[in-house]
Amino acid sequence: MKQPDDSGPTANTNATGPQSARPRASVSVSASASHTPRRLPVNPRRHKVAPEHRKRVATACNACNVRRVRCSGEHPCRQCQSSSRDCIYPLPVEKVSITRSELEDLKHKVDLYERVLRDTVPAAVSNAVPDSASRQELSDLLGWTASNHDLGSSAVSLAAQTTPTIDAAAHIGRVPPELPQLQYPSIHRQFQQQPPHLHLQAQLSDTRIQEPSYGLSRTHSIQLSHPGATLQNRQDDEENLVSTEGRLLHDPDGYARFLGETSGATFLDYLKEFMTTVLPLAYQSLRPGSDGSAFLSSLGRYQTYDSRPLHDREVDPTWFPTPPEMDSMLSELRYFIQDGNCHWPSGGIYWWGDLSSAPTIPSMERDSTNLRLAKCRHLAFYQTAFAVVSQAMIMPPQDISIDPHLSENYFSRARMLLGNPLDITRFTPNEVSVLTLMGFYLIEMNRRDAAYICVSNAMHISIMHGAHRGWLDESGKRVFWTLYVLDRYLSCLMGRPPTIMDDAIRLPLPCDAPSMPPADGLKAHVQLSRISCHIVCNTYRISPSEDAARPVRSLEGEISMLDEWCLKLPPTVQLASNGLSDDPATCLLHMHYNQLIILTIRPVFFALVKKSFAEKLVSRQCSLSSHPQLPLLKRCIASAEHNIQLARQILLVNHPRKLLQAGLHFIFNAAIVLMLQQLVEDLCPSSRSEKARSLDLDFVIGRFEDESRVGSNYGRDCATVLRDLRVLVQRLPIPVDMSTATRSVNMTQTTTTYDPIANRTHVDMGQQWSDKLTSEALQQPILVDQGHILYNELVSWIDVDWQSNNGYLI
């Protein structure tokens, strides 16, 4: 892997030749002993470059240095600016030159002095150094941390502990009560609690301090180590790993939101960086006006408007539809997002509460406004339910007689009835179901940040009332687990830590109960969400476990967890032999399972794409045809294809209802995977035809086109991204054999759009791509040599480490 030339003239410390054999070779030493964090050492394989021949900046910023990529040298550099990172350069350090023998003598003396000082009685140091500031500086250097009192006054002689004597028992009985807690308080307490024979063993083990060697025994040095050494070493190891830090992306309104590694927007930003780098190399005459430029120009931003608030509307919060209308809407909602009106064998994968009967509206003719609000406050759940079903029933082509803001009107009524969610004196566990359903509605309205906050509030209210400890009936238990599922889904969707960790929850899983639907679907959903939390927190290091003894897990380990979950499913939530089910909830559950497989393998998939392109651009060769990770990549592609198949099945079974937001999210990511497959078609060929893949992509884009036709910015933006990305992917393949590529491009490809739903939008876009591509002459890609500005970055893609480091993806 190539290293940016960031060390100046003294970068090559492993130079060979006549000078290296001289007995007094000159070395470069920093005048400052401070260590610059988050920087890697100079690559010893890089040859020395004379200053007049430099093609790189002398000093790279910390971020480019850690990533081994080329730094432009500006403030901020181009890499950091495009990734919205802080661009920090190391402080200039004065350097002096001394002979190697002098350096070795100095290091030997410093080591000797430090070891002797550590062996010195603290009281003697206090007497020898009268200045308190100097004493403090010396104690910090040696790792002595005396708390709540001065070093000199608290220290006592350690001679009784470290000097071997025959009358050991007399000393042992006297020393421990007087021993100052200069290191670890826990070790001091353990020493006080040890029986006399253990004190004797510890004392005798320290007799090695009297030996001629300089320094303490290993046993004694453990007690005198710095209290933060172990933690600091662990933190340094974490920082030295290749970071998975996410992105701070801006939406079209300019609001910045942190989106972690599991977020689709963050992965799309990585794709934009990759394509911005390689597209000009493959097509030298590409101009900004070409197809797909809108996608590339949005680097550092994401296209959706999910930060826009839902404004409160001027509505009467105590108004309700007629009882027949309420019964109809609740029945539709129960079928759509709960248990299929008891027709689904799984019992559904969510439980929101009792939706079987319409509420009774209290009499409020002569009541004041505040009294009316108080009487109807418990009905906020139903107003939220009406908002969800009104949003779900908007179908294209939209009926102009239907109020497009009908669902927002219901949601405003629910918020006005519920009141301030931060007023803890008004909230009870019964209101948790309202906030949970509100979070679901906000997800469906693509207000992900608002949903993240709403679900977090609901979880904290549940914890405040002890719901996580099990003080609930079966209905309350199912509501809590539904809230848990939403919390884990948003954590994965946004790449952020979950609200509560699994170890803090002692609530039993859902179980079957009289007059309630089966619990198999929700129980399986909870178990899958636990695996999702593990993947998000540990595999992607969004909130990694501090357990140092945690076993190292590879990609195969994460996949095996998911496969074990699938094998243990009860028959009611299993798929048929054709990979489908007549239960829409079961189909959506398995779409979630496939999405987690995609999410786990996606970093390796993307690394393979980059490595393949880099090898073709640098050497016109590709060494990945027999790579050990290829079976995992095929598994990722198969999961994407299966998700699109399941989405078609849901639309068939649920006709004329549309996909939930989760289903749209799953097929969007599946389409991205199928497009990336086209970039490595020669390495990982699909078992399906190109026509079948094109039909799948047409289907996905068609669903988002349908969403855009009812006024959804999310649907419009996702359709635009997929169309632009599809054009760019068609441009990017760089085969080694150019003649084969010419023949494949000149072949006419005709596709027809297949849609299993009658009378729905037909999107005929598959026939456009070949015309757009063949209108431009296929060009010979650039052969990137060492003098090219992007050579180091491409080589870093080739040198990618495929293994996992301490269980974390890199």
Image (cartoon, rainbow, N blue to C red):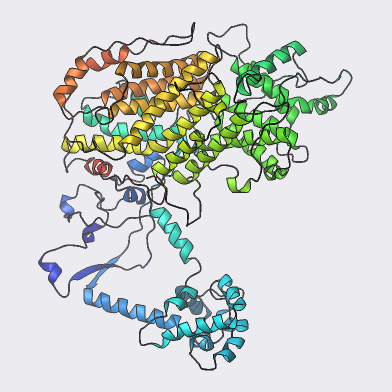
Q: Nearer the viewer, residue 509 or 81?
A: 509
Q: Is residue 413 visible?
A: no
Residue nearer the viewer, 242 or 52 = 242
Could you tell me residue 182's position as x and y percent? Answer: 55, 76
In the picture provided, is 185 more to the left or to the right than 285?
A: right
Quarter occupied by the C terminus = top left
Give the tally of numbered discs.
0
The percent position of residue 642, horizontal first and vertical second, equals 42, 24
- Vertical order, 169 against 621 (above or below): below
Residue 47 location (% of width, % of height):
17, 55
Write the residue at 20% across / 47% down: 55
Above or below for 349 versus 211: above
Q: Quadrant location of residue 343?
A: top right
Q: Could you tell me residue 476's position as x and y percent?
A: 71, 35
11 and 672: which is toward the camera: 672
**14, above or below 326, in the image:** below
* Residue situated in front as seen by the camera: 742 or 124: 742
